[in-house]
Structure formats: C-alpha cells, structure tokens
Image (cartoon, grey):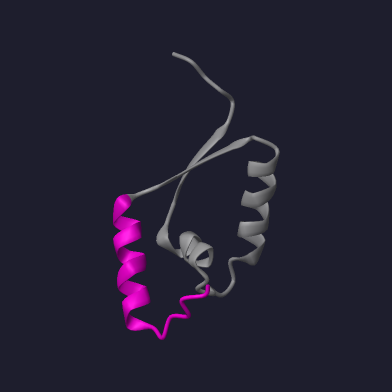
Amino acid sequence: MNYSGKIKILLDTTYLLPIVGIDVEDIEETITLLKSLRKESRLEIYYSQFSILEILGKISKLRYDLES
C-alpha cells in the first residue's frame, strides 16, 4: 500500500457552497485552514456528485447572481 502522507478529506456541501458564491456562516476559519493545507500540498480534497446536486437545488431556490 502506498501512503502519500497527505490528508484526504471528503467535503460536505456546506464547504463547497462558497466556491459557487453562496455565503455560509461560521466556516471562515475552516476554509482558511483548508486553503493553507492545500497550498502546502498537504491536502487532497474530494467531493460527492450528490453534493453537486444538492448545490444545484440550493441555487434553484435562491435569487442567484449568475456573475458569481
């Protein structure tokens, strides 16, 4: 088995929403940490296709700004 030493994390929809311009309260500190680990190449990020569907559902219920 090959161990890369990287942290592997499956992101929940909550942490993917800011990527598409939807603000989420109280996750700034976590996002900052994830960005730092990713920049240092210490983190592999994964997401589920179901999270993408959930995001699309959330966007469809909001007045979404297409420029975001």
* Image location (x, y in percent) of residue 30: 61, 58
Left or right of residue 57, residue 18 in this image: right
* Image location (x, y in percent) of residue 57: 30, 72
Residue visible at 42% across and 56% down? 12
Q: Please identify the residue farthest to the top as the structure is shown.
A: 1
Q: Main secondary structure of the magenta part?
A: helix
Q: Is residue 67 shown in magenta? A: yes
Instruction: Tell how many labels.
Output: 0
Q: Which residues are magenta?
A: 49-68
Q: Please identify the residue farthest to the bottom as the structure is shown.
A: 63
Q: Is residue 23 shown in magenta? A: no
Left or right of residue 62, residue 30 in this image: right
* Image location (x, y in percent) of residue 18: 53, 66
* Image location (x, y in percent) of residue 40: 70, 38
Residue visible at 61% across and 58% down? 31
Residue visible at 32% across and 78% down? 60
Left or right of residue 51, residue 33 in this image: right
- 16 over 39 or under it: above or below: below
Q: Please identify the residue farthest to the front as the structure is shown.
A: 67
Quadrant location of the N terminus in the rendered image? top left
